[in-house]
Image: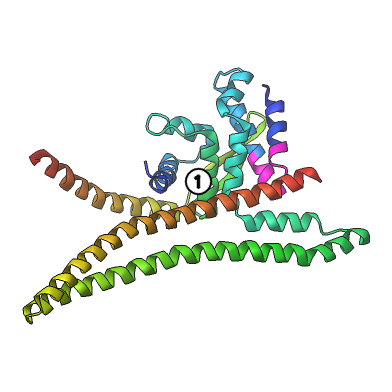
Amino acid sequence: MDKETFLARLREGLSGLPRSDAAECLAFYGELIDDRMEDGLSEAEAVAGIGPVEEIVAQTVAEIPISRLVKEKVAAKRKRKAWEIVPLALGAPVLMAAAAVALSVYAALWAVAVSLWAADAALLGVALAAVVLGPVQFAQGRASSGLALLGAGLVLAGLAILLFFGCKAAARGMLILTQKTARWVKTLFLRKEGAT
Amino acid sequence: MDAQLKRGLMDVCVLAAIRDGDAYGYQILKDMKPYLSLSESTLYTVLKRLETAGLLTVRSEEHAGRLRKYYRITEAGRQRMAEFQAEWAEILAIYRFITRGGEHG
């Protein structure tokens, strides 16, 4: 692939980004190719060494905050015709409701993760209390109930430890989901930009 | 390697590459190659991140009939490197403690 083709494909991939970001990125790779050629590589070798365009696009997009992408999109679409505004105004409540639903589902998932931690903490608290109170009862002469309390405490402590791993997995899962969603939302902006 | 750790290391490596003088993108890649192999796209994101954080500045200069960008470390960038060195002195002390334990076991 020659330099022009490479840069054209890169420009296409970055078309949804704020213009200044895309221009800066293109200048960086253009300069890198020139420098590699100056170092004695052929044009094709210099381009091949840069790596796949898709990877560059993905990495560049990942570094740009969603707020910048949204701002760019709003700025680009400021001049709308009247017939465009009507369906937009009608559609806005539906879109907002959809966004609210998505947000509440997300919050509910986090609530599950958080409540798992709370349940684990409660379990551990009860287990500790039982382990402490068991021997006290035993010392006060209630041997059977003291032993039962101690045993129950140990079993609960075991369950709490097991649940701890579940809690960790749930929290990690939520973090991964958050990252993936952010990435997906970004691609949504890029795709729409490319289509119009 | 842990992703967050690698990110921090790359930032400081790029700062180290421009510590003794301004450098352009390809030169940074070549200087770092013996120590840390960095892809071009990664270098770009690292440079952008450092510029946004005010750890380096960029200027364009004409070279062989075209513009080339040179990166210069700022005072904040030097401070970041000093912080990194102080942190790693601590980590190295812990590392020595861990590996010394290994010899006995």
Amino acid on which disc 1 is placed: Arg
Q: Camera-side residue: A179 or A110?
A: A110
Residue A152 rendering spot, x and y as whole percentages: 22, 68
Label 1: element kind:
strand
Q: Is residue B57 above or below residue B63?
A: below
Disc 1 crowd rating (10 Å Cα; few below 14, some 14-19, many 20+) is many
Residue A48 rendering spot, x and y as whole percentages: 59, 23
* Residue B82 visible in this rendered orientation of the protein: yes
* Residue B55 visible in this rendered orientation of the protein: no
Q: Camera-side residue: B85 or B61?
A: B85
Provide the residue span drawn in magenta. Answer: A12-25
Q: Is residue A11 above or below residue A180?
A: above
Dominant secondary structure, magenta: helix
Residue at far front of view? A144
Image point (40%, 43%), residue name: B6
Residue B67 rendering spot, x and y as whole percentages: 65, 36
Q: Is residue A84 magenta?
A: no
Please indicate whether residue A179 sits to the left or right of residue A139 in the image.
right
Q: Which residue is mark 1?
A: B72
